Image (spheres, rainbow, N blue to C red):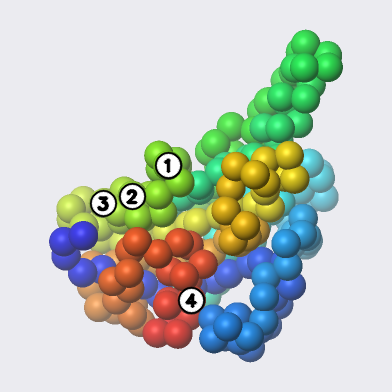
Amino acid sequence: MEGTVFCSRPACWAPGLESPGDWLSWADGGKQIEKSSGSPPLAFTAPLFRRRLSQLSRMTVQVVHDALELTGCGDIKQSFVSLRGEITRQISMEKALITEETVLPAAFSLSVFNAPIALAAIACGLKSGYSAIFPAGESFHDGLVTALAPVLSGSEDRILLVYGDELVPEEYSGLHSPDDEPLAFACVVSAEATECCPIPCGLEANPAQFLKQLLKEA
């Protein structure tokens, strides 16, 4: 990746990690992310809004909300990267197609790939627009470079980088790495050194390794 961009301190959410100390311990190899379907309560949203949200959507809404509060960046364009998207809803619809030969519109509406970041924009009142990026071959490197392209090209001064993936359903466990974890994070990325740390060089890393580097440098 050519050029240098800088990140704010990231806002993170994962099952089993709650305090800043927990996240630093995780980054140092101490605490572990729980491989569970646990999700944030989203107490700042209306009950009707959050009632049907998946783990991925809840995590995404939470980290976007927290990043806005942490950085005070205001309305800002978002670049959302996910390697698997709404995978739990996907398998639920596949089961419905097999057993019932139909999919209800309500199930489909929140299963589309951009649902998590769209819901985050609604919950946080963001109107600047977003990109939803699904990199081929689960390549976090490709997804990250694509997400950062607006800043690297100079078309945007800054963006909100958002990553999220939920727990892989047991039915799909053989198709994914055992290291895959439910995790979401968000940070402001800028071309100016006004943010706290440069993007880590290890762009071939997976999302967890990338976040660990950010936490250590922030």
Q: Is the Cβ of the residue at disc 1 closer than 8 Å to that at disc 2? A: yes
152 left or right of 90?
A: left
Identify residue for label 4: 212
Residue 5 visible: yes
Which residue sits at x=53%, y=38%? 114
Total label count? 4
Please tell me the numbered disc located at residue 142.
2
Q: Is the Cβ of the residue at disc 4 closer than 8 Å to that at disc 2? A: no
Nearer to us of marks 1 and 4 is 1
Please tell me the numbered disc located at residue 137.
1
Label 4 sits on what residue type?
Answer: Lys
The tag earlier along the polypeptide, 1 or 2, is 1
Q: Residues within 10 Å of mark 3 (few under 14, many from 20)?
A: some
The tag earlier along the polypeptide, 1 or 4, is 1
Identify residue for label 3: 149
The tag earlier along the polypeptide, 4 or 2, is 2
- Which residue is nearer to you in this view: 62 or 107? 107
Quadrant that contains the N terminus: bottom left
